[in-house]
Image (cartoon, helix red, strand yellow):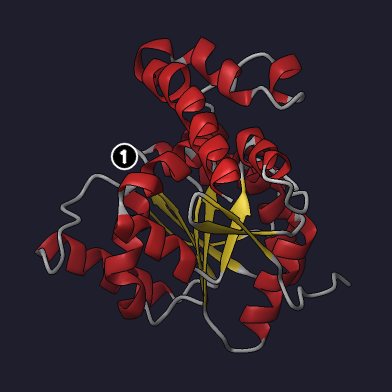
Amino acid sequence: MEEAVRGKERVEILGVGVDRMSADELRAEMLRVVRGGERALIMHVNAHALNLAYCRPWLRETLNRADVVFCDGAGVALAARMLGRPSLERFTHADEMWRLAEFAEKHGLSLFFLGALPGVAERAAARLRERYPGLKVAGVRHGYFDKSAESPENEAVVAEINAAKPNILVVGFGMPIQELWLKENWDRLRGVDVAMTLGAIFDYVSGELKRGPRLLVNNGLESVARLIVEPRRLWRRYVVGNPLFLLRVLKQRFAR
């Protein structure tokens, strides 16, 4: 039986607290929340997320109010070392979805998938069910709807999720749209025990998007691998964003 997380320690990087926890501890915390009748908001951060939060006070505040913020990026783990802080365990959301599905099947937890283009999340759910036939998928909904507060489409999506009553809602809109949507709707998602942001997870799981060479992915160079796969879309995030992130971390270090 997995042990639940107790007394989580947060490492502050560019004004955002990142929890020191392993993937096993994260899943154990989710199970504890569900079985304890509680609610939890779980978000992930990488260098891109912390760059966005650096310039957006609302995003920084939203991340710091989350119940769990986990490290999803070698750059964030490197930043903790540069700052002389306790080490962070990095685990990628693309890998975590498969493990989460296995964990959910084992413990009878239901999932709701929200995000990606029409049909993509459905294909992701089908692939997960192929490997884990007992997985409970409470619902699937694409992410192309009017997400503005109180719009009819948004109201319908919130009502659909609440009616499904999933233990875990997986939101994959990309940053910072998914964080903003949860900021505006979390208090209204009363049928959900845990909400979790996982970015482009449905594109990866469905096979729509490749992760790049495994040699790079497995050695903490996923940003390079992703840049190879999507150079036109991601060049600014990595070629400009990663050095900027490291400069900001150095500024934080010397400011101390």
**Residue that carries the numbered disc 1 in the rendered image:** 118
Q: Is residue 123 above or below residue 141?
A: above
Q: Nearer the viewer, residue 92 or 145?
A: 92
Instruction: Give coordinates of residue 137: x percent, y percent.
Output: 53, 60
Q: As drawn, is 255 to the left or to the right of 7?
A: left
The residue lying at 37 percent from left, 38 percent from top is 119
* Left or right of 151, for residue 50: right
The image quadrant where one finds the N terminus is bottom right
The answer to whether residue 115 is visible is no
| Residue at left offset 47%, top offset 44% | 50
Residue sitting at the far right: 1
- Position of 44 relative to 26 (above/below): above
In the picture, residue 110 is in which quadrant? bottom right
Q: Nearer the viewer, residue 38 or 126?
A: 38
The residue located at (50%, 57%) in the rendering is 16
Q: Amino acid at mark 1?
A: Pro
